[in-house]
Amino acid sequence: MKLHRVRDFLAGALTMALVAGLAVPAGAALASKTIQVLTGADIYIDGVEMKPTDANGNPVETFVYNGTTYVPLRAVSEYLGENVQWDGANQRVYIGETPGAKQYLNTVCPPYQSHKYETPTTVSMAGQTYANAIRLGGWYSSGWALYNLNGQYSTLRFTVGHIDDADMHPAELNIYLDDTLALSMELDPEAMPEALEVPLNSALQMKIEITDSGFALGEVEIN
């Protein structure tokens, strides 16, 4: 589609412009340099003006130097739907996925629609604490969450189990990918937590459903 082509082109072009403009050898230390620039260049994406801001929402200027237009990397990347990470130890910028880093579903792809859905800071299952958790369902009733994966992910990993001190009711976990059932399992309140991995196969949409509130998914990663 046109939007995807424009997004891909801009992301590649802007990244190349910044890397070429820096011209810092791999592994070299960053150095300060005083330069004269032209400011005030406006940025339009698909005919809509983008007003760059920093991580705190403050306006950031673009500028032109030696015939190259420089833009705030974080502002443009996030506008195009990509995460940006600064690795200070290695003086590197990562756009999108950071090698070796874990991505949690709650952070990178929260649900766009849900019912009886909670994201507690932590949950305790079989005496062990799990962060990045999802709790779904109510008293003898289902809870669910819908996620727009947009074909960007390949694997979902999590640990599912009964929440300590919750009611001892059995339940069922169902995961749908593009309206097709990809995982269905009975949840036993007396069973130990189980680590699972679900191939996402570049699905566009995912639905997670649990039929009772006594269970949770912990450390929910997506890659």
Image (cartoon, rainbow, N blue to C red):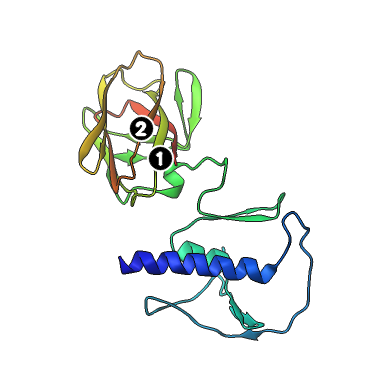
Residue beneath disc 1: 119
Q: Is residue 21 left or right of residue 204?
A: right
- Identify the residue at horizontal 52%, vertical 40% (top origin): 102
Residue 198's label in the rendered image is: 2
Distance between mark 2 and mark 1 Cα atoms: 20 Å
Q: Is residue 86 left or right of residue 76?
A: right
- Indicate whether 87 appears above or below 125: below
- Indicate whether 133 appears above or below 37: above
- Kind of residue indicated by mark 1: Thr
Quadrant for the C terminus, please. top left
Q: 24 or 200: nearer the eye?
A: 24
- Indicate whether 42 appears above or below 108: below
Residue 154's label in the rendered image is: none
Mark 2 element type: strand
- Identify the residue at horizontal 55%, vertical 63% (top origin): 74
- Identify the residue at horizontal 46%, vertical 41% (top origin): 104
Mark 1 element type: loop
Query: Percent position (x, y) of residue 68?
Result: 61, 79
Closest to the camera, between mark 2 and mark 1, is 2
Q: 205 or 211: nearer the eye?
A: 205
Q: 200 or 72: nearer the eye?
A: 200
Q: Residues within 10 Å of mark 1 (few under 14, many from 20)?
A: some
Query: Percent position (x, y) of residue 8?
Result: 43, 64
Q: Residue 21: name its quadrant.
A: bottom right
Q: Residue 105: name its quadrant.
A: top left
The numbered mark, 2 or 1, whose residue comes first in the sequence reads: 1
Query: Percent position (x, y) of residue 92?
Result: 66, 55
- Kind of residue indicated by mark 2: Val
Q: Is residue 12 visible?
A: yes
